[in-house]
Structures are given as structure tokens and as C-alpha cells.
Image: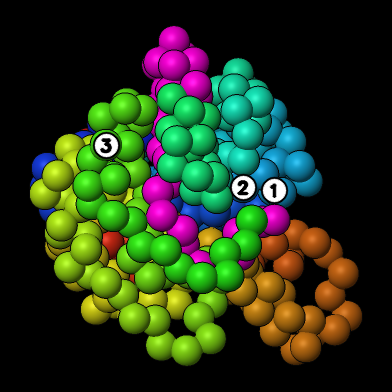
Amino acid sequence: MPLVTSEKMLLDAKKDGYAVGAFNVENMEMVKAVIAAAEELNAPVMLQTTPSTVKYGTLETFAGIVKAEAAKTKIPVCLHLDHGNSFELAVQAMKAGYTSVMIDGSHEEFENNIAVTKKVVDVANAFGIPVEAELGKVGGKEDDLEADTDTNTDPQEAKEFVERTGVSSLAVAIGTAHGFYVGTPVLDKPRVSAIKEVVDVPLVLHGASGLSEEDVRECVERGMCKVNFATELRVAYTDAVKKLLEEKPETFDPKKLGVVAMEAVKEQVIARMKMCGCDGKAK
């Protein structure tokens, strides 16, 4: 199937009370693993790349790989720019074949965030591509963006932000962090419900790697329609490679490393998709 945008899959999730799993990929093996997991579960799926990933591999390369793999399956696959850090990169991603983009102006002041987001939305509308934005600050580090403290999203600001920008989905801060958690995260889950009451677009949960199944499920029940996973997939991938090299240090064929890595990533993705409730939801 050709790549699809994120709009319908997220609106379906919002209507039916589940979340679409969105998984950051770093190479061909991770792309194959994520799509294989989605195919096995008959689940819609979003594959994501960050600015540092596309700097490493280029937008065109990842668009080509994902497009080729998606063409082999009947499930809906979306390619999303995660944490787009500039108007220029977001536009380049659209031109390269991405079917969803995020512009992250959360490190800016409220009015500046609105301005850059609206600018991306205006261009994306011409391409027919949905835009995700972020309001509030998710802790931890994503690429070169680092938040020292969490600033949770204000529901009324979220309402104004969506109305003035026309975004298709909104990532909100409730106490999650990018990367793995040092201690036990304390999430303001009622805030998800409060934001959902005043915002019409699907809500997005960033920083889900390392969260408990209970936390993820409750966030989804309260209104999160897209859940991002990144760090734990990288760890699953590299741990599988390390294990093989420890057991068989004579291994030199990259394909053998790729096979075990894909199996580990696929297993992780399957578990997270079931947690999000998107298994069996491909349409």
C-alpha cells in the first residue's frame, strides 16, 4: 500500500479509544522490524525519524526505504518527521515524501511557537499533509533539544494554540521525559482528560520509553491517540547485537547482526502496540 498520512489513522484512534504506536527508526533493519510487527498484528503504524537521524541518513533515503517496505503490505503506514526543528526541515520532509511532519516550537515562547507552527501548517495544507506540534516542555533530551525542567501543558493555552495554528495533532507535556527515566515518573494523567475536554485534535504522548503498561494504558484511555517510542527500540537493537557478538565473537557478517536486531525490535514493537490497543485496528 502507498504511504498514507497520519490524519485518518489518528482520528480513527480518537474515535475508537486507542492510540497509534509511533516508532523511531534509524536504519533499514528497524524499518523492516516495525512494519513486520504491525503486519503481524494488523495494526496501523507510524515510523518516525528525528533531525539527527535524517542528518545521518537523509530525508530522501528514509523516505525511499519506508515507501518500498510499505508497498509490500496492506496495512496503513505513515512516515513522520519527529521533532522537526525548523520550518525549512519540515518543508524539505514534505518534498522528500514524508506524509506527516512535526514542528517542535515548544522551546520557544508561546507566541513564537504559534508563529512557526502556523507557518508550517500553511505550507503543509498545500501538500495535504497533517502537522503535529508541541506545547509545554517534555523533559529529558531529544536530539540536540534538552529540557532541564518540565513545564506541563496548560489546557486553555492548548485550546488557543490549536485554534490559532490549525494543527492536526498536539503533543502535550504531562511529566514524561525523552530517554529513559532516572526515577519513577510522576505523570499528571488527569491533565490529559482536561486538555481533551477543550481540544478537538488528537493528543500525542512523547517520552513513552520506560513507562509502565498501566501508565500508557491510562493515558490512552484519557485521550492520547499517538504514543511515541524511541530509546527502548535503540536499546533492544544494540543489546541483541551485543549478545550475538558475546556468544559468537567470530561473527562478521552485518546481515547476521541485522537479523537478531530485527527480531528484538519487532518483539518490542509488538508489546508496545498491544499496550496502545492498536492491534487489529488497521483499516
> What number is the disc on residue 91?
none
Secondary structure under the numbered disc 1 in the rendered image: helix
Q: Is residue 276 magenta?
A: no
Q: Give x and y (percent) for residue 248.
A: 79, 84
Q: Are marks 2 and 1 in contact (CB under 8 Å)?
A: yes
* Residue 87 image offset from top left, x and y in percent: 60, 28
* Badge number at residue 50: 2
Which residue is label 3 attached to? 160
Residue type, label 3? Glu
Task: Describe the element under mark 3 as helix, strand or loop.
Answer: helix
Amino acid under disc 1: Thr
Residue ID at (62%, 40%): 85
Looking at the image, the residue that sits furthest to the top is 126
Judge from the rendering whether residue 281 lies leftward or rightward of residue 178; answer left or right.
left
- Residue at screen point 61% across, 74% down: 235
Q: How many marks?
A: 3
| Residue extent of the magenta highlight | 119-144
Residue at (15, 59) in percent of width and height: 193
Of badges 2 and 3, nearer the viewer stands 3
Estimate the x, y position of residue 60 in percent, counting from the top left: 69, 28
Q: Which residue is mark 1?
A: 53
Give the vertical position of 30 relative to 140 (above or below). Answer: above
Q: Is residue 162 left or right of residue 68?
A: left
- Locate residue 121 relative to residue 169 in the image: left or right: right
Label located before the other in sequence (2 or 3): 2
